[in-house]
Image (cartoon, rainbow, N blue to C red):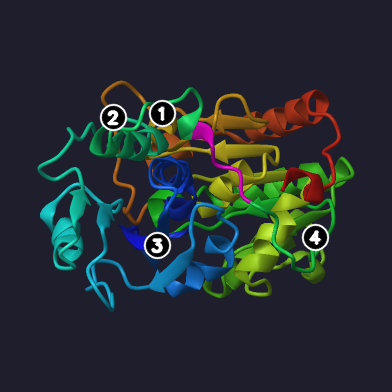
Amino acid sequence: MSRALVLRALGLGDLLAGVPALRVLRRARPDHEVVLAAPGVLAPLVDLVDAVDRLLPTGELQPVPWTGPPPELGVDLHGNGPASRVLVEALDPGQLVAFDGGPHWDPDEHERARWCRLLHEGLGVEPRDGDADDLLIAVPDAPVPVEGATVVHPGAASGSRRWAPERYAAVARHLAAAGHEVVITGSAAESPLAGRVAEAAGLPPSSVLAGRTDLAALAALVAHARLVVCGDTGLAHVASAYRTPSVVLFGPTPPSTWGPPGDGPHTVLWHGRAGERGDPHGRACDPALARVQVREVVEAADALEAATPPPAPAAARD
């Protein structure tokens, strides 16, 4: 069997934003085994992506541990420069598809559309309406920590994408008072942050799920959730992957490049100014994100509740 090696050794949100492009690849090369080179920690969600046959664990910008004959096709779905391209070139693929030296890179293009276009142009695939929004994945066969919960996720990989904890607490307090079963999620390292948010919101310690769920359980939680409130981070993409209603707070990166599909039950809040673009890896809360107010988030959550019909059982969304 012919093999296609795809490099996207990035994080959770990056994996899910790349799903539409992986489906374009599957359509273009239905006879290929699609091997995704990505961090091993993402395996529980990679297994839910129907366009991937096998995960090849690797680290960001590390040599790809490929074995056997060269792949017939190598795809750099990681970046637009030589740092990632040379890792795919080193495998000596029969055909290489990449932005560096290939199609034009547009920094203002939406992430999902960008990688679909790379495959459209690089493999001569006719674009289809909706390609970039073809991002739903299967629901994991894992226990749901809390059925029908409202998930508040205050963490993010960088400080510039973390809204103030006391503001998350105010939102959580409002939602709990409105009858939501609120849980606070995060990584093990974010457990102290989640605990502070829960305490300030008047929630019991049992509401803190940070550090207590693996990736499959977290995906199951979101797939069965009533609502998600978070910043521009991986969990927002999980909500998009299951069409779970979400309120997503943006800054420093605009939703025009990383936001959820416009036709889903998702509300984005963004107060970036013309010409203003911050550092997505910065340490301090970005000014655009800081301009988002508690009142806006509460109103957006209430409006979603009023506009969104009760969700179908998550299994029906597989």
Quarter of the figure that contains the N terminus: bottom left
Q: Are marks 1 and 4 in contact (CB under 8 Å)?
A: no
Residue 59 locus on image (x, y percent): 32, 72
In the rendered image, which residue does mark 1 sit on? 256
For marks 1 and 4 on the same chain, the one whose residue lies earlier in the sequence = 4
Q: Residue drawn at (57%, 75%), measured in percent from left and top?
A: 188
The disc labelled 4 sits on which kind of residue?
Leu
Name the main secondary structure of what is drawn in magenta.
Answer: loop
Q: Residue drawn at (67%, 71%), measured in percent from left and top?
A: 213
Q: Residue drawn at (28%, 78%), measured in percent from left and top?
A: 67
Discs 1/4, front: 1
Q: Residues within 10 Å of mark 1 (few under 14, many from 20)?
A: few
27 to 211, vertically: above or below: above
In the rendered image, which residue does mark 4 sit on? 203
The answer to whether residue 142 is seen in the rendering is yes
The disc labelled 2 sits on which kind of residue?
Asp
Q: Is residue 288 left or right of residue 208?
A: left
77 to 131, vertically: above or below: below
The disc labelled 3 sits on which kind of residue?
Leu
Q: Secondary structure at mark 2?
A: loop
Spatial CA distance of label 1 from label 4 is 34 Å
Q: Is residue 146 left or right of residue 122?
A: right
> Range of the magenta residues?
133-137
In the rendered image, which residue does mark 2 sit on? 108
Spatial CA distance of label 2 from label 4 is 40 Å
Q: Residue drawn at (15%, 60%), measured in percent from left and top?
A: 83
**In which quarter of the view is residue 255 placed?**
top left
Spatial CA distance of label 1 from label 2 is 8 Å
In the rendered image, which residue does mark 3 sit on? 36
Spatial CA distance of label 3 from label 2 is 26 Å
Q: Secondary structure at mark 4?
A: loop
53 to 297, vertically: above or below: below
